[in-house]
Image: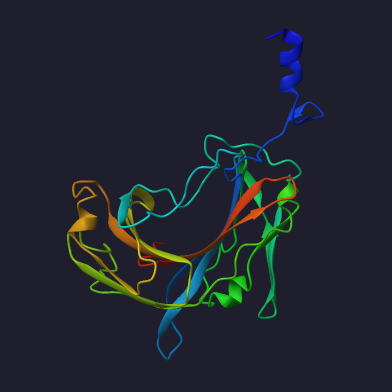
Amino acid sequence: MKPHLLSVLLLVGCESGKIALGGGDAVDARLIADLYTWECDDGFGTYAGVYSYLVSLEYAPDNLAPRGLPASGCSASLDLFPQDAGAGAHELDGASAPTWTNGTVAGVDISGVLAETATGFYFDDVFANQRTCKIIADVQGEGTTIDEAGVFSGVSTPAPEELEAVHVAGLDATVGIAFGDETRVNWNAGSWDESYVQVRREQGGNLMESVTCLTTGSESFTIDDAVWSLMSEFLDVDITNLYVGFQNTDVVEAEDGQKIEVLTRANHVAIVQE
């Protein structure tokens, strides 16, 4: 190939000397509204109340790290909770200070700013200094919308469903689930798109290993040998925790063809460590 022809081809799809990003078949970005619930008591009984709320935006055009659930059964070491945008991370053009909002919910304006904590990763720990017992609808309303986020401005996560309560049989509040024990989990929740159970072995609050099991369409799950066989009893941990998760998902295409996956999740945490 002649040198001048190669130069012309390299400029195809470029604007102002920049190679166009995204626009392929793969998803380019991911917006997650993560609600974390714990057991609250209103004097009439226990319910799942929101104690923490995180909003994250990942941007890795055509190279986004997978964070999907197992197609069936259980899988070890799935990374569902991002802390960066992965190997394909890229600065999101026009997103120096993205904002997010849930609008006015139950008379309170719920909004904030997503700080760029790593290349292509924007994050806000909404309830960093407080723990609430609000119900999901009073925190997230109809979804989380971002702005000042380049081509993804105006994109929203799906509206959440209800999560009334989650019950774990025989849970020890100091060590969580005893390794190898058969443990029954059940819940009362709305019609979320997908649900899952994640058994998490933690040391000092840090995740050491995990197993995630698809539970979509069910109202209960039994942690048994099929789960424990995917984990190590000899791992040095101080607690075996449990997340019972629910999510609504969608994919939105921007005007320039880039795609963003949007998720609203509720994760009920069995043991909330101080």
Q: Residue furthest top?
A: 2
The C terminus, quarter of image? bottom left
Would you say 128 lies left or right of 149 here? left
Q: Residue furthest front?
A: 1
Note whether 101 is above or below 20 in the view shown. Answer: below
Q: In front: 123, or 24?
A: 24
Q: Residue furthest right?
A: 16
Q: Would you identify the image quadrant in which residue 156 lies?
A: bottom right
The N terminus, quarter of image? top right
Q: In front: 144, or 117?
A: 144
Residue 79 picture location, percent across and down: 42, 48
Residue 174 picture location, percent across and down: 28, 65
Residue pictured at 61% horizontal, 62% vertical: 157
Residue 54 picture location, percent across and down: 56, 59
Note whether 111 is above or below 208 in the view shown. Answer: below
Residue 123 in sight: no
Would you say 121 lies left or right of 237 here? right
Residue 31 in sight: yes
Would you say 241 lies left or right of 235 here? right
Note whether 15 is above or below 171 in the view shown. Answer: above
